[in-house]
Amino acid sequence: MNCKPGDLAYIVGGLDNPSPNLGRIVEVLRLCGEDDDGPNWVCKSREPLALMGPGDSTVYATEGICADAWLRPITGLPITDDIKDEVTL
């Protein structure tokens, strides 16, 4: 699992290629269930997300379901290893 409730995460995937939601930041609220591809989360965004509606239509809402595989948590940790810490000389 990439995320847990309370995480902030970037959307990095979706059903469409490319997804109209790529790069959006969401708050992971709660687990919504699992399917063959893994867990799904209810997520909340400040801006409306393009979501699948009835009959494969597109609806826009600030809360929707995202697959765990489509999310990358924002951890605040450095991305590269070139940052020296206090024990490196």
Image: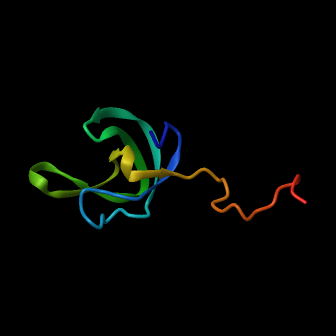
Q: What colouring method underlies this structural image?
A: rainbow
Residue 76 in the figure: left or right of residue 52: right
Residue at 42 percent across and 53 percent down: it is: 45
Residue at 43 percent across and 61 percent down: it is: 24
**What residue occupies the far front of the structure in this picture?**
89
Question: What percent of the width, then of the height, locates residue 48?
Answer: 35, 58
Question: What percent of the width, then of the height, locates residue 55?
Answer: 8, 51
Residue 20 in the figure: left or right of residue 55: right
Tell me: residue 3, above or below residue 62.
above
Q: Nearer the viewer, residue 56 or 15?
A: 15
Q: In the picture, residue 32 is in which quadrant?
A: top left
Q: Nearer the viewer, residue 35 or 43?
A: 35
Residue 25 in the figure: left or right of residue 38: right
Residue at 60 percent across and 50 percent down: it is: 75
Q: In the picture, residue 39 is in which quadrant?
A: top left
**What residue occupies the far left of the structure in this picture?**
55
> Which quarter shows the N terminus?
top left
Number of marks: 0
> Which quarter shows the C terminus?
bottom right
Question: What percent of the width, then of the height, locates residue 30?
Answer: 42, 34
Residue 17 in the figure: left or right of residue 47: left
Q: Nearer the viewer, residue 18 or 46?
A: 18
Tell me: residue 41, above or below residue 60.
above
Q: In the picture, residue 57 is in which quadrant?
A: bottom left
Residue at 63 percent across and 60 percent down: it is: 79
